[in-house]
Structure formats: C-alpha cells, structure tokens
Image: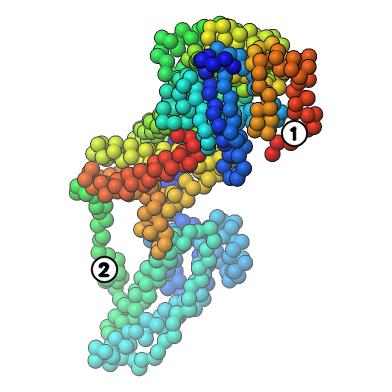
Amino acid sequence: MFVMPIMLVIVVTNIQNSTFQLVSKNKLPILVNNRDTGQSGKQLVSTINKIGMFKVLNIAGNQSEKQMSDAMHEQDAMLGVVIPSNFSVKVAAKAKSIADKALKSFGLEGDSVKQAGDVDPLTMYYNPVLQESLRLSVDGGMRSALQLVESRETLRSLYFSINEKPLPESLENEMLNNKTAINEIAVSKEGTRINPNATQHNVPAWTIFAMFFVIMSLGGSVVREKISGSFIRLKTLPTSYAVAILSKQIAYLGVTIIQAIVIFSIGVWLFPLMGLPALNLPSDMLALTVVTIVTGWCAVSYAICVGVFSETQEQVNGFGAISIVILSALGGLMVPSFAMQGFFKNAANFSPMHWSLEAYYTMFLENGKLKDILHNMAPLVIITLLLQFLTFVGLKRKNLI
Amino acid sequence: MAVNIPLAIDIENMGFRYPGNSELSFSKLNLKIAKNERFGLFGPNGAGKTTLISLMTGLLSADEGHIKLLGHEVGKQNNNAVNKLFGFVPQDFSFYQELSPVENLEFFGAWSGLGKPAIKKRTNELLHILGLEEVRDKPVQKFSGGMKRRVNLAIGVIHEPEILFLDEPTVGVDVQTRHAIIHYLLELNKNGTTLIYTSHQLSEAEGLCEQVALIDDGKIIAQDDLDQLLKDYKHDNLEQLFLNLTGKEYRNDV
C-alpha cells in the first residue's frame, strides 16, 4: 500500500517530465530530404533548425516513401520531411506574383501580373506512435518556418520590384527577425508565481489514484471476512457488525492519509535528488488537509461499498482495479477534463477523483485557499455519503446488520 | 422433560423457509433444552442441523413461531444482549488466519464485551487448558487442523457463555485432540454451561450427550434421553438407532 503507489508516482512523473523535456530540451529528430537546389530550400532547412524544436538530420537524393520510412527507423527520427525539387522556383514565382499585385494595388507600374500556382506541398512523414497533440505542435512549427521563408521571398521580390536592387540583409533581418516577445505567466489565485511542471501536475493526481487503490486491500478484506467465516463469528458476538465496518473505515482512512503524506514528502525531498522538479506544497495546509481527508474518506467508502456487494475476491480485484482506472480516466488524471468533449465531460462530474483533482490543482497550481476548494468538496462529500448509504443498504439486504 | 425445569432453549411452533423457497424447511418445530444439559442434535446431511443452529444463534431469522435463549427472544431488537448469552463454535474455522491465537482471542474477546484484564486472564487460561501456550504468538495459518480446532473452540468460549453451540467441533482432528476437546467440554458443562452439540461422530456423541434429538428433513423424528431412546428402539448404540430412523440411502443435499 505504500511501495507501489510511491513507485507509480516516481515513474509517471519521470515519464511525463521526459515528455516535457522532449519538446523543450531534448529536440525531436527530423529527417530532411531537401530535393530543392535553390536558396529557399536551404533557408527552410535553416529555419527549421532555428525553431529549436528539431534536431535536423539531412538525407540526400530522391528518397521514396519506403526509403524515407526505413531511414527514419534507422536514425530514430520520429519525423521526416521532403522539400520538393521545385520549391525555390515555385516560392519565387509566387512571391513575384504577390509583389506585382501589391505594386499594382499601390498604383505603381510593374510587370504584368502573372497568376502563379501554389507552391507544391511539402511531404511530412511521421511515426504513428507520435501523439496527435505533439504532431499538431510540429505542424505549427513547420508552418511557421514555411511562412517565414515565403514572407522573406515576397519581401525580397517586392523590394526588388520597387528599388530594382536586392533587399539589404540588415533590413531583411530587421523586418523578419524582430519578433514581438510573448510573456507567459501562470495565473494563480493569490497573484504568486508558480511554475507548473511535471511534478506539480503528477504528484497530486497519482496520489489520488493511489488512495483509491485501497479498494484492493480494504474491499478484499471485507470479502475475505465474509468467505472465511470470521464474519459469522462477528455476527454472533454482542457487538454490531456495523462497528466492524466503521472501524475498518477509520483504520484505512489513516492509511490513505499516511499514503498522501509519504508521497508528498517524496515529491518535496526525494524528487530533487532524482533530477525532477521539487514539489511545491500549497501555502494553505488546512485546505490541503481537508481535501486529503475527504478524498481518503471517499476512497475508503468506495472500497467498503464494493466489498459489501462483492461475493468473491476475484470480483473485488477485477471490478475494483478496472473501476479505479475508469474513474481516474473520467476524472482527468490521464487527459485533462477541459480537453474532454460531450458525454465524457459531463461524466467527469460523477467521478470522485475529478473533484479531488480539481481541488488539488487549485491548491498546487493556483495556490488556492480553503474557500476556493469548497465548491469541489461539496460534490465529493455528497458522493461519499451516497456510497455510505449504498453500503448500509447492502449490509441490510444481506442481513449483515 | 419435567415441568418447571429452567430452559436454556425454548423453540415453539417455529417455521422457516429459505429465501426464494415457497416451502417451509421447518414447520411447527418444537424443541426444549434444559439448562445445564448436554444435548446432541444429529441427522443426515441436509437434515437441517446447521440451519437449526443458525436459527438458534440468530444468524437466520425464523419466519414463524419463536426461539428463546434463557427467556430472551432471538432475532428481535436485543440481539446484542442475546449474543452475550451464548458462544458459537462453527464447523468452519472462524478466526483470522494471519493472527496468532493470542491476537485472535484478544480481538474476539473485545468484541464479546470483555475488558482487557478479563481478556488477558481468559486468554492465558484457555491457552493453557487447550495446550496452545507454546504457539501462542505464532500465526494460526501455520497450525495443524487439530490446533486450529482448539483455537476455534477457545474463541467460542472466551466470554464464558451460558450456552455453547458446537457444530462438528472435532472434524478432522486426531484422537488426542478429540479427547482433549471432549474432556474440556465436560468440564464446561460441570461448571454450568449448556452444550448443544452436533456431529457425525456418533460414538463420540454417545460419550458426551445426555439428551439427543434426531432430525431429518426439517423434522425432529426422535427426541429423548439417549439411554431411553436406545431402550425404546431396542438398539445397542446411537449409530444403529440413527440408521434405523433415517435409512441407509445416500443423501444428496443440493
């Protein structure tokens, strides 16, 4: 109940942190087959390199799709791009056409406007393993590079058409490279600055997951008691079986709270030693305590409920494990709730993990206070009370109390 | 049974049907067991012995009639008060295998309503009497069948009940253990405990029980003092009487 949840949090945080670094520090290898012999092709390759997201691996010749695929596998490149042989010609023609149109619209005389065709598309190969979200980021990066190359060519063409001399490099750089900065600020409830990272996201999320996995031991304990005959003995003793159920809840609530304390402590002290970002605990420890206790109580209530209604250990293990995975998926532990659509977005409201996670994120990522998480705690308490009621009904129906 | 003898168990017109069954498994059953008696309940497989014990201990609720233990109605609101009066030694082992005898006795002793000093005293007494002192702190799952039976018995008597229900308490044990258990039960009875005993070991029951009832198909087919029954039916032992009254065919209990 302690070792495996700790391993889970460490492994998942490490993996998620690696994914983050894949994009920021560890560049994505891209195999570039530049069939173009002109400047625009070279500039495109150079621009792709400058984005900072890619590690460019060049491959010469007219590579077929199969050859590109094989080369990508050989060089562990998740992406490959083919720049067509007429890229520079087509970009130049398009730029000239746009420049002539612009001059005409300025009322200046220029060459007669020839409508240029579209630039032949680049071909991008990608490993199907690459997640769509990452692919979309790559797509965005490539389009930025293309935009820059085409804009540069258009500017050059326009300048030449007006001045009949090449665009000076310094002016060209000033026009194209003087980018407006974007300040990125993570908003918080109190105006303090918190840097979201893999640790801040993952430790609270997987702590909730670990707490709910108490179903395996507690639910199993309830079933084992029924099967083994100990419960027969308990029923004939002058203390109500309801006391047994209540005492199990209190004991296992303590276990879930200790689980949370241990995992958070590992985030604070051990993670930095492992090269992971340290966990920043929320400033409102009362709020953190409340969320942890209510989450633990809900987890324990769920476990007892499943144990009461299950007849065999196999039912508890199977149903318990899979239901926790489903609830965690619905709850936003794997995919953020805001990214869900339609039915599943609404279904998230029925997962107790959703409310716990929202509360934890409010505290860990936005430095929220107790008043900020009360609206998350109310549904969690309601779900818990409902589970307690179902447990009571189950015990009554089975004549256990 | 003479009038005015105090009753340990009084069952009157009791009827019971299993959930889902339309027919009554027991119908208008009457049974009276006097205080301090050593009472044997025998019958073939599926006759209803365990069901009857479950009804007497409140594990099942009767649909008709009433069951009283020492004057207290079983199955009513005061279940906890009734549960203090009796002890139960079920056929299946009913304890926590991961715990030691001491831990099991402490746990069930607390659940029986005993205080810590009483639990400690009784634990030491029972471990000594039943020969479990040397293994008092070892987990029960490592014990032999006979040792587990002794632990099972110790837990049933830790709170010194006035009535003790024993459902096949010597199944699968060796001669020494059986002898020790029977001897201990006789001692308990001498000290005032009423014994309700079921077993398929009829020879063992003959040495223990004074009054017997033979039950078959939910009905009591014979009940009396053991010696009187043997005399009435002209049999030498309980096994002959049993086979005469219940037949020799297999009982397929589904």
Residue A133 shows in this picture: yes
Residue B159, percent across and down? 48, 15
- Same subunit, tags 2 and 1: no
Residue A343, percent across and down? 42, 62
Horizontally, residue A152 falls left or right of residue A139, namely left
Inspect the image, locate mark 1, and give the three-letter code of the amino acid beneath it: Arg
Inspect the image, locate mark 2, and give the three-letter code of the amino acid beneath it: Glu
- Quadrant position of the C terminus of chain B in the picture: top right
Q: Residue at x 51, y 71 (%)?
A: A123
Residue A251 shows in this picture: no
Q: Which mark is residue A174?
A: 2
Is A279 above or below relative to A123? above
Residue A40, percent across and down? 42, 73
Q: Residue at x 26, y 49 (%)?
A: A375
| Residue B165, image quadrant | top right
Horizontally, residue B242 falls left or right of residue A188, namely right
Element marked by disc 2: helix
Is B102 above or below relative to A324? above
Q: Nearer the viewer, residue A95 or B150?
A: B150
How far is the residue under mark 2 from the one under mark 1? 101 Å
Chain where mark 2 sits: A
Residue with the most extreme front position:
B3
- Residue labelled with disc 1: B251
